[in-house]
Image (cartoon, grey):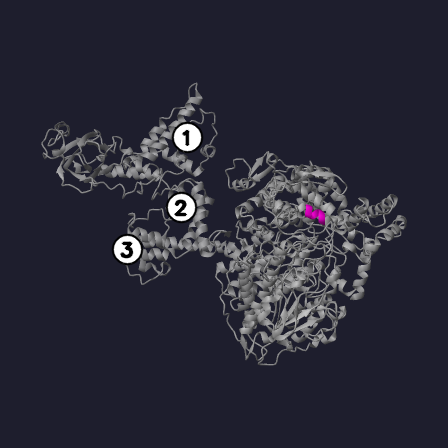
Amino acid sequence: MKSTQGASRRNFLRGAGVALALPWMESLPLRGAPAHKPPLRFATLYFSNGVEPIHWWARGSGASMEIGPALEPMMPFREDITFLRGLYNQEAVKSSSPHLGRMPNLLSGATVSLDPSSIRVGTTFDQVLAQQIGSKTAVPSLVLGIEPNELRLEDGLSMIYGSCISWASPGKPATKEIYPARAFDLLVGDGKGRQLDRSILDAVLQETHAIKPKISRSDGQKLDEYVESIRSIETRIDRAAREERLEGWRPTLTKPDMPRPADELPQNVPDHMKLMLDIMVLAFQMDKTRIVTCMLNNDLSQMNFRFLEGVEGALHLDLTHNGKAPAAEAMYLKTNQFHVRQFAYLLKRMKEIDESGQSLLDSSMLLCCSNLFDGDAHSAEQMPMLLAGRGGGLRPGRVLDYLDKGDDNRRACSLYLSLMDRMGVQLERFGDTGQRLTDL
Amino acid sequence: MRVLLGACLIIAVSAGGTVWGANESAANAAPVFRQYCLQCHGKTATAGVNLEHLISRSMGDNFQRWEKVAAALEQKRMPPEKMPQPSDGERRQAVAWVRAKLDDFARKHAGDPGAVTMRRLTSAEYAYTIRDLTGLDLDVERNFASDAAGGEGFTNFGDVQFMQDADLERYLEAAKNVAAHAVIGSGPIGFFDDPGKSGLELSAISRIQKIYRAHGFRAAAGEGGRPYGLDRYAKAFHASWRYLHREALGEDTATLEDLAAREGISPQFIRHIWSVLQQPLPSYPTSEVVSRWQSLPAPVGPDSQKIAAAVRAGCEDIQRFLIDWPRWLFAAGAMAAGGQGDERALVLTDASLQPTVTHRFRFPLRTRGQPKARVHLSVVSANPNSKEKTVVVWRNATVRIRGTDRSSGPAQPLKSLLDEETAKKLAFGQHPDGRAIDPEDFATVSDSPLFFDLPAPKGAGGMELQVEVGMGSGQSGDAVLRCTISGREEVSEGRPVWALLADPKSSGFQAWKTGVLEFAARMPQTSHGEPTPSDKDPIPAPFDNTYNQPERDHYHTALKYYRQDRFLVENMLDDATRLRLDQAWADLLGSFEYHDVFLRFVAEKYKLDLKNKGIGELDVAQIEALPAEPRQLVKDLRAEYDAVLKAQNAGRPGHVGDCILFAGKAWRRALLESEKEKLRSFYTKARQEHKLGHPEAVRSLLARILVAPAFLYRLEQPAKVAEVRELSDWEMASRLSYFLWSSLPDDELRRAADAGELSNPQQIERQVKRMLADPKARRLSTEFFGQWLGFYRFDQYRGVDTGRFPEFTDEVKSAMYDEAVSFFEHIVRKDRPVREILFADYTFLNQALAKHYGVQKEIKSDEAELVSGANEFQRGGLLRLGAVLTATSAPLRTSPVKRGDWVLRRVLGTPTPPPPADAGSIPADEKAFGGLTVRERLAAHQRNASCANCHSRIDPLGFPLERYDAVGRWRNEYSDGKPIHDSSDLADGTPISGLDGLLRYLKAQERQVLRTLSSKLLGYALGRTILASDRPLIERLTDAGADASFSKLAAEIATSRQFRYRREPAVKSSETEGEL
């Protein structure tokens, strides 16, 4: 990554809408945890198609916090969560496309290009983090998912939008790994025995340099993706082979404590999700990465929830757009609860893992969110967002209500800026704001 | 930097021409837009349409939106009814202005190749390319996760093709996987289904089998050995006869080889048979073949046809003799016919021709409840050179009677059991020459068969006759007798027991045996039914070939193979085939430690102490010191081992060259000398620096070729700034092959590219026609039609609730997919008129799908077959495809909205804008409609004015399909028994009734349907969105009409300027957008 940092930084600046390259970027203060203290981790768990508003609320605080039925799985974790009400992305609300204009920009606040010949959103803040601090770990960031990219257009737009919430650059989504075995391999790959791979990659890299002057500039830009990919792999091979660490802290786990998952995609959704969440925890515990983004489903997902008792039909068409029929509403609620239960599982596991006298959750910030509030109405005027963990000085057990604080004071990007600050990446502006979230 | 980019953008915009130019009609049109449109379609951008924004941009970039604007005005869909309406004149003016501007733009820029983002292979293209490169279906793309659709709705659109380390890791892995399947042996590099060493072994077997199979047979037989490919004998005899009589037949100049070719046999074989037939003094039984051949009638006389038939029949008789002779000699009974059930190898060898002077028979007799059992004794001379009759004496004949409980009684003398008459017939105690012999013995004379009946006592389960037979004293030593005891007169029909009687030391027998072995060697009579080098072979001498004995079993598990194809190699194969066969054998024996294992096998048998040395480690002195018998074996083994090593070494230098050829194919162009050199040095480096063995180094070289950008990306030379450039022939070859085959150019395209033919439109058209007829054009059906019409990867479709529709099994799903793919494959490959896409009266069904559809038609196959007259049972054409009807339904019910939208969007190409965010929805399940039908629910929805504008266009096109349920079946009512109304009124009042009505409507909209097909096909071919400048081409394609064949459209596109030229984007918008 090192040699391409300039290029990727330019990309992200452009995408994030930063006005100019700022000189302070050269000396980013890497405000990590002091030595012998576990590093700060950040993860996003995304579920699509929003919620039913009457089911998603919270009031009060701490152990006596009252929560809506969709949040029922959070009952044991009320002291670990921060309920955020009223955050939104301005560009999402402005977009005329009810789904794809409001989803791939969830984590960037950027405008989604509705021109069919140009795929463009904005670098998402998880990838800004990966580009800035990802080099501290073997894997800069993990981007996980359950459903593959959908191969069609939705209203003339590529469903790549609906399949990716993590974007490495404005025009390029971060590759989403849906195969548990491959995600697992990323964490345990040792770099040894890959010398031959390296020599193959070296050879094609040289060849690419020879080719580049002979092709057009725009083709060359496309080929840069290839060059960057080679460099990332080579860096990973080298880094894994070195196994050296800059900080004094040592992860509590050096070898995976779970078996390697099977090569195939798991047959049922709950197993698949559980595996992905376990891999997430494993990655944090082994300190292979500190940034994870996981999509439980794609936008417009037709995921079938028949595995939940009493639920039938597909998520988007049947359950989200349920015509307010009571029976269907009840099923929709079960799907919302199911998604929150995944988050609860993550919390439970991370809470149980001890790292130098504190839990893994204590040094983490976890975000559970969707891009729409009322899924049926495609409303993005606010988004369901739940923050968990005490990492970065978060003070959970609270309900933070921004809805009536004025539009400029309730930007999701303000949250992102605040979270990035804590991860050690301080930007002046991000997406639609230059303001940090108050009270966090 | 910013200044420079900004300047470029200005140039680009002025080159494109802004919409509000200094134009007179603009002055008239502008107020219309301002007055009637901008209130909603200005900054508020209702439905995403901002006319102010459009006006400020280049017409060409937004032509599709402008076309929609014009259509909406023209069809009075806009402004909405409740809003102030422009006069008809104002409408006309505004529309005319838009159209004129569009036409003007299109004319000016017609044929613009457009900017195409460089494309990476899609995962489907990758898989097809690997398949065409290696001949293997390795499923390497299974884990690729990087596809996305864009542009006109296809995965081959460069802007949605991304590359990141995770993708590249997969490419690297796939490349190594492909390379593992390379067969790196003594011949040129090939590919095989199994990887690595076992791939080498199995590929060698398959190559060997292929050669054996193609040439009929080889001279070995084992278990179940039976005639295979021996019809070549009759053909060879026939060709030889024609050659002999060539003058009389009026073919003086015909050569043996010519005549052989006519019979379909190899020149080697005819030369061999001819030489056998021309032997001056053939020994028996060859002499029998020769004399029979010589007595074939000459081609003289009036009835030449009759003679020809007689000769043909005669040749077949000779062949039959040839095959049957050993079976006759070995008295192989009915069980041996065809080899079924008889595990003996009827091979004429020194061992199988081992005679005895006396032999003791045990012959089981079945009484089957009969009062007596008949016994046939036969002594036949097998040696016609022995002229005298021979007497054999049957001694000490006894019979044991078994009870029904299988208990065996005491042996009783035969004589005591026979009636008087029979005993007299056998003449106990009498030699034919009158001498007395033992009173319990009897004698017979050769070639005088004899039978007698043995009475079966009541309650006997069976009997066993035991008797010893031997030649009478003082008999001629020349005699070779086949003695049999059988229950049938014709021994070949029963289950005879037999023995070969002769004096092994006699010169007569020796001469006879030599003759038989010669016969076996020159005209082998048996071969394998299944030509395999594997464990059906008899194991070689001196090992014990007895079935189920340890030595044989051990041989078969440890060594498996034994080459025994001398006849084939010497007398049937041409040099090139022989070389390939030798290479395959070298690969087979070199694929594991064959020779070392063999050596241990020999050491074990002869108790040799070889100190665990491998065959290659034995020196000459050590071998010479071995006892004679194993010495020869080990020598032969060593010679074969050396030959295998030599063959392997001989193959190696060619392999790097093979890789370079492979790279040329994979990279789809001719390689530069410097590139070849780099590949060679990669190999050298792998050997020297990474210390890899030859096969591993070759594999890594192959992997390296397959992760190269030249393989993964479709690279093209750039055009100069602001110019267009004609593509090179090689670039054209790739464009054609990826357009029509989703894969790389084949040999013919490569040849054409090399010959410079692909810059010639006629030649391009010729190639298009050829390529569309090729089986690979099925991929156009899956890739293009599948993505355009929404049944892409339908075999993996998960949108049906199978709890509700358990009938929708995986089998039905894949049959539906196959129906759709086969349907379009038919249109493409049979070059059908495009009209049939909608109006075909045929479809493709297999048994499962016919059952699912409830089609009362007998379909036997599991494979989809063409069924005509399909309209009769509500099938045929795009709209009735199960995959389409299912994919446009909701999981639990049909969706007229989805189906209507599909017709509007995919077939008519005139989609409505996306619904407003708060559109609301109708329930998922038709059971939850509270008594209302889908139609009634939607009617309520439509009453909402903001919905009506679009839904009045969408829904009427979906309702006519209501008679098909959510899994594509025809139905007469809803599941709750409510009737189905499948008629509707279009927004303009046109009524549409049912599917036929919808088809009639689409027929009336034929130009629009054709325009959609043309635009989509063009977008797919070019890998970009349609531009305004494509309109003239699209109109041309549309003008070709519904009767145009598919190839006409494809050829028109392939010869278009868009397809054959290239230009670079003026300025990549991503360079500027963020900073402006």
Within 10 angstroms of label 2, few (less than 14), some, or many (20 or more) residues? some
Q: Position of residue A245 (x, y in %)?
A: 57, 76
Q: Which residue has dot 2 on it? A: B532
The earlier-in-sequence mark between 2 and 1 is 1
Q: Position of residue A358 (x, y in %)?
A: 56, 78
Quarter of the image for residue B373 reads top left
Work out whether residue A203 can be spotted: no
The residues colored magenta run: B936-940
- Element assignment for label 1: helix
Chain that bears disc 1: B
Q: Which residue has dot 1 on it? A: B238
Q: Nearer the viewer, mark 2 or mark 3?
A: 2
Q: Which residue has dot 3 on it? A: B605
At 67% from the left edge and 59% from the top edge, which residue is drawn? Answer: A375
Dots 2, 3 in contact, CB < 8 A: no
Q: Amino acid at mark 3?
A: Lys
